[in-house]
Image (cartoon, grey):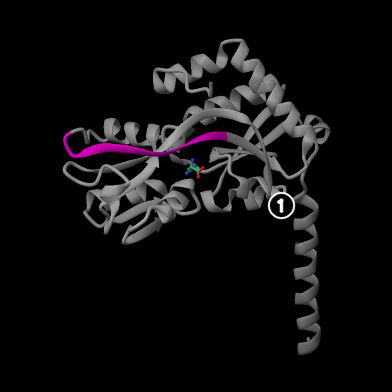
């Protein structure tokens, strides 16, 4: 085959794949989702106890239970898709999932790109360090802070005056790893994540919890303007909060009700 023909075929194959990709990756309305019988949910899978893979490599956590309960309320089969945290909202906009539940705090910046549901829990970012290490924002002067990339902790850490360096990690547990190894002086993460990590890894004698750096409302997200899905999720969440399901799931994971009040 002459070279030009081969090149042309390659271009055509490439265009074909591109077209297929565009056809499949489409933001779906709630009617389209209903017809398919399945709702696609995006999450991360590395943020225990909210969304993570357990020892048997099963996706689990508070947000997985909640997502499954929401799907059930809507009469749909959940299909979970785990992706890196920093790509979730981009892929949501491309129609890769119908909604995302991955502990996103509601921020003005994010709200420009996606639409948030009503919050499914309230929490805060907290300073974690080794015993004797920094506990307050003031203590962080001249220190190295580890945070997951693209999070509200990263944003908060960058705003603390005098911090020597903010080190970013693809996954939140990697920041904890570096704290334990002494490569960072402090880790800023979710307060429930910190509590769970200390308990789960038996680090009570090693780590300490410091100051709450900020508080946030955490919500699910849909593609910008996808009102039919937004309304369905808000309705389902409200129903679960009313009928006791939410309280039961929350008690199971935290021993308390973590809804915003
Ligand atoms: N709540 C924080 C934020 O809004 C962290 C979320 C991290 N979520 C995750 N699945 N790793 O940025």
Q: Is residue 214 visible?
A: yes
Residue under the point 77% across and 48% down: 26
Tell me the quarter of the picture where residue 74 sits: top right
Residue under the point 64% across and 24% down: 70
Packing grade of label 1 (10 A; few <14, some 14-19, many >=20) is: some
Compared with residue 201, is residue 65 higher up or lower down, i.e. above or below?
above
Count of numbered labels shown in the rendering? 1
* The magenta segment: 205-218
Q: Any magenta on residue 228?
A: no
Instruction: Using the image as rendered, state which of residue 45 and residue 131 is in the foreground.
Output: 131
Instruction: Using the image as rendered, state which of residue 52 and residue 237 is in the foreground.
Output: 237
Residue under the point 79% across and 29% down: 34
Residue under the point 42% across and 23% down: 253
From the image, which quarter does the N terminus lie in? bottom right
Secondary structure of residue under mark 1: loop
Residue corresponding to mark 1: 94
Q: Residue furthest top?
A: 243
Tell me the quarter of the picture where residue 54 sits: top left
Tell me the quarter of the picture where residue 213 sits: top left
Secondary structure mainly formed by the magenta segment: strand
Pinpoint residue 11: horizontal percent, then vertical percent: 78, 75
Pinpoint residue 29: horizontal percent, then vertical percent: 80, 37
Q: Is residue 55 visible?
A: no
């Amino acid at each position: 085959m002459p070279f030009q023909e081969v090149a042309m075929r390659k271009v055509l194959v490439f265009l074909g794949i591109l077209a297929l990709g565009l056809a499949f990756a489409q933001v779906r309305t709630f009617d389209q989702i209903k017809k398919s019988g399945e709702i696609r949910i995006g999450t991360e899978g590395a943020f225990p106890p909210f969304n993570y893979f357990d020892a048997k490599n099963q996706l689990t956590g508070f947000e997985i239970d909640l997502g499954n309960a929401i799907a059930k309320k809507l009469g749909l089969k959940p299909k979970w898709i785990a992706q890196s945290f920093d790509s979730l909202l981009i892929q949501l906009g491309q129609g890769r999932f119908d909604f995302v539940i991955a502990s996103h705090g509601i921020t003005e910046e994010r709200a420009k790109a996606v639409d948030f549901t009503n919050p499914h829990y309230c929490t805060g970012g907290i300073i974690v360090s080794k015993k004797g290490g920094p506990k307050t924002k003031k203590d962080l002067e001249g220190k190295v802070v580890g945070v997951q990339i693209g999070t509200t902790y990263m944003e908060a850490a960058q705003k603390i005056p005098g911090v020597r360096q903010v080190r970013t990690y693809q996954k939140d547990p990697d920041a904890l790893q570096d704290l334990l190894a002494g490569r960072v002086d402090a880790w800023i993460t979710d307060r429930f994540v910190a509590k769970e990590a200390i308990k789960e890894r038996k680090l009570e004698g090693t780590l300490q919890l410091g100051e709450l750096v900020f508080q946030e409302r955490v919500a699910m997200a849909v593609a910008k303007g996808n009102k039919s899905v937004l309304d369905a999720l808000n309705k389902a969440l409200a129903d679960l909060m009313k009928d006791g399901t939410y309280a039961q799931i929350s008690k199971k994971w935290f021993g308390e009700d973590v809804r915003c009040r």
